[in-house]
Image: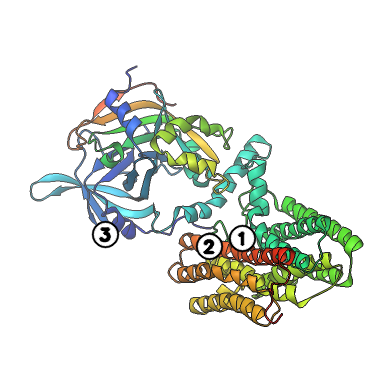
Amino acid sequence: MMRSTPPLDAQAGLERLATYPFQIATWVDERGYPVSVAVQAMVDPAGRVASFDPPAGLTVPTDRDVSLTGSHIRPQPGYGYDERRHVTVWGRVTSGIRPDPMTRILTLTGRSAWGWDETETPFFEYSERSVPRSRRYFDALSAERGTPVRPRLSFGFLALRATRLPFLTATIVPVVLGIVIAASHGAFDLAAAALTVIGAAFVQLGLNVANDVFDSVQGADDANVTPTQFSGGSRVIQYGLVSLRQMATLATVFYVLAGVVGLVLLVTRGSPALLAIGILGFIVSLGYTAPPLKFAYRGLGEVAVALGFGPLMLLGAYVVQSGGTVAWEPFVASIPIALLAALILYVNEIPDRRGDAHAGKRTLPVRFSRRTIITGYNGAAAAAYIAVVVGVVTGVLPVPTLLMLLTIPLARQVSRGLLPNYDNPYALMAYMGVNVQLHLRAGLLLFAGYVIVLVLGAIAPSVPVFIGT
Amino acid sequence: MAPIPEPVTELLEQALVAELTVVDANGRPVTYPLIPLWDGERIYMTSSTLFSRKLEHIQGNARVSVSITDPVSVGGRTDRATIQGDARVIDEDPHGGWERLLPIWSAKEPAIVSFLKARVALPLFFERALIEIVPRRVLYWPDGDASVAPQVVVLGQEAA
């Protein structure tokens, strides 16, 4: 069974107890009620004992367990409090005589201990480790009432959480970019563009939900005790908010809807290229975590994400608009987006690596050292910018796409945050957020570059936007 | 039946944290730091289902105590008290039943309101049971000094 807090023996418990300014002696009185009284104990961890003066007017029993507790908070006016920690040591008490001056003294010999210190086990990890207890509580409530009792969330919150809706930017960026590139080539159909966005969004929603299903079945999400806003899955299955079967059904519904939209596009705008992209996209999406492919489990998650959220999405959107024509420009434009999308996954896998390793999910951060991983991040981010510069210099991409270089400071910010926060999932979360922003803003700036191309094409067609023209 | 001494109700109203002690199946006391919520008649505490072991102990043995011992938690006051009482777990609606105590809770921990608004981030933390404690006996140390016998006030009939 998973422990909520690290194991603590009596000696370690007494060492902690000694750090508190006073202790609370507690026992169960003859009437069966607990009694607590604050005492000043002299704690000797090496001897596994703590001694204190007998409290006046109360009888501390010697025939049953007595506990000594230390508890600490720091009040924060207007907020509440922080710095939470507590420790309890249990043992039997013996009564003795202190030699000088001759007074009675009680000595507790520690036998067991328990405690929590949020600097050692952060609250979110403590909560996550305690999820099985919550599930047992709800199971017991359900058995007692004869009807299922589950934790709940409002429909909006549940939909947001289960589908990981905010991550749709990963889809919207390449699809919209593909559409605007096609528009710069003179091809634009609003209805087809809208359908492309909707269809691609269904693919990602299917992927997100299926990912939770297969990670739950294969144990990766259950083994993860440090999920964050950006990593560790939606947790709705682990929390008992949605059943595995319901999530599997939801994933199927999203893929079916994606398939329907894909068929409409094939019928109305179809081409062999679109069919090939659609089939490949479905395989990459489902195979990301689903057996037998399980790309993410084989260290190929980044490749799958780069392919899916780069060339496949961007070229797919372009081909829908172009009526089947494939071009180098959208492919080259997809390279930086592909790399930055893969880097979102790459960084998000860092806090998951212990749970992933436990579940046999051999992601890149599981396989390689932190130095290699950080070097890999720097290399891939640099490659994203180099791809744009090379694309512009060779005349494949228009000059305004160099706007994407404005996001370099964000990439540097993430890079600098990786090393000091590599082992702290909650501190790393801020950098995971910046990393998501990096992908989004890079995409927006590439989009802005093409909007400039369109505007110039309309008002000043003689102004060259490609080097060499 | 004597009322709870006024200094003790003041302690209950002021304390950011108190120690709830329950009795486990082996008869051993187990102490949990929790926020005491005093409605003028009974002491309430809330527990997430994530940390529900204490609820199981109470369901097995209703006899509990609440002690207020830390001067830091009560704005520097040095008096101390332990209230023995009978507890029951109220968990008919873990999702929202406890929210009736939110005004008293948020007065001590204002941040809880913003956390609750973002309950999507911590869904199980906000699936909670109420612990309702009927005070039976009060031990009060006006100077907080255990070398002096406490004032003892018996309040009412104990649980069978």
Specify the quadrant of the image occupied by residue B119: top right
Judging by the rendered image, the residue that carries numbered circle 1 is: A221
Q: How far apart are marks 1 and 3 (CA)?
A: 39 Å
Residue hosting label 2: A434
Q: How far apart are marks 1 and 2 (CA)?
A: 24 Å
**Chain ID for label 2?**
A
User: Looking at the picture, do discs 1 and 3 lie on one chain?
Assistant: yes
Q: Which of marks 2 and 3 is in front?
A: 2
Circle 1: element type = helix
Give the position of the N terminus of chain A as an image quadrant.
bottom right
Mark 1 closeness class: few <14, some 14–19, many ≥20 residues within 10 Å: many
Looking at the rendered structure, the kind of residue marked 3 is: Pro
- In three-dimensional space, the C-alpha distance between marks 2 and 3, rounded to whole angstroms, equals 46 Å
Q: Which residue is drawn at 24% across and 46% down?
A: A22
Are callouts 2 and 3 both on one chain?
yes
Tell me what residue is drawn at x 27 percent, y 39 percent.
Answer: A37
Q: Can residue A38 be seen in this view?
A: yes
Give neighbour class at mark 3: few <14, some 14-19, many 20+ (Cα, 10 Å): some
Q: Position of residue A418 (x, y in %)?
A: 48, 70
Q: What residue type is labelled 1?
A: Asp
Residue that numbered label 3 is attached to: A45
**Residue drawn where x is 40% and y is 23% of the image:** B41
